[in-house]
Image (cartoon, rainbow, N blue to C red):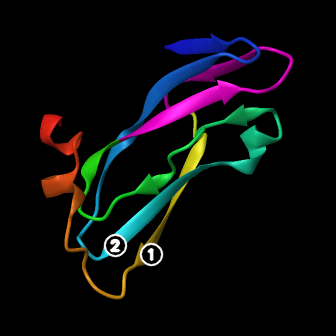
Amino acid sequence: PSLTLKPLELVLGKTMEKISLANNIAGRLDGRSRYARLGLAVHVTSSLIQPGSSNHQVLEIINFSGRPIKLSAGLRISQATFSYLNSPTTKPYNKFGKIAKNQ
């Protein structure tokens, strides 16, 4: 399946991969520069992947360009980085996150 985003159109998507983090690891999900140069952003506000989370990450995909951008399932528009914490979180997302209880 594919989708053509009109200029300034926003859609919500999700990663194909489920990301599961231990309580001592945090992550960040960002757009890839190749698509940023075309005017595509994958996060408007929330790039943090909380320690202890285990879910598909929601993507806030917006076309900031003046022309349509075609997207298809499996297109690699984002990338993740991970960092070890000095100590495990005391409030892991899988126990304290509001959305985590519904996934």
Disc assigned to residue 91: none
Distance (Cα) linking label 2 and label 1: 6 Å
Residue 89 to residue 33: above or below: below
Please give the residue where the numbered disc 1 appears in the rendered image: 83
Check whether the beta carbons of the residues at disc 2 and disc 1 lie within 8 A of each other.
yes
Residue 80, percent from left and from top: 50, 57
Q: Is residue 47 left or right of residue 37?
A: left
Rendered residue at 72%/33% (across/down): 40
- Label 2 Cα crowd, 10 Å radius (few <14 / some 14-19 / many 20+): many
Residue 14 to residue 52: above or below: above
Q: Amino acid at mark 1?
A: Ser
Question: Which secondary structure lies at badge 1?
Answer: strand
* Residue 70 found in image quarter: top right
Q: Is residue 69 inside the magenta stretch? A: yes
Check the image and name the residue furthest to the bottom. 86
* Residue 72 found in image quarter: top right
Rendered residue at 22%/50% (across/down): 97
Please give the residue where the numbered disc 2 appears in the rendered image: 25
Query: Magenta span: helix, strand or loop, mainly?
Result: strand
Rendered residue at 65%/27% (across/down): 62
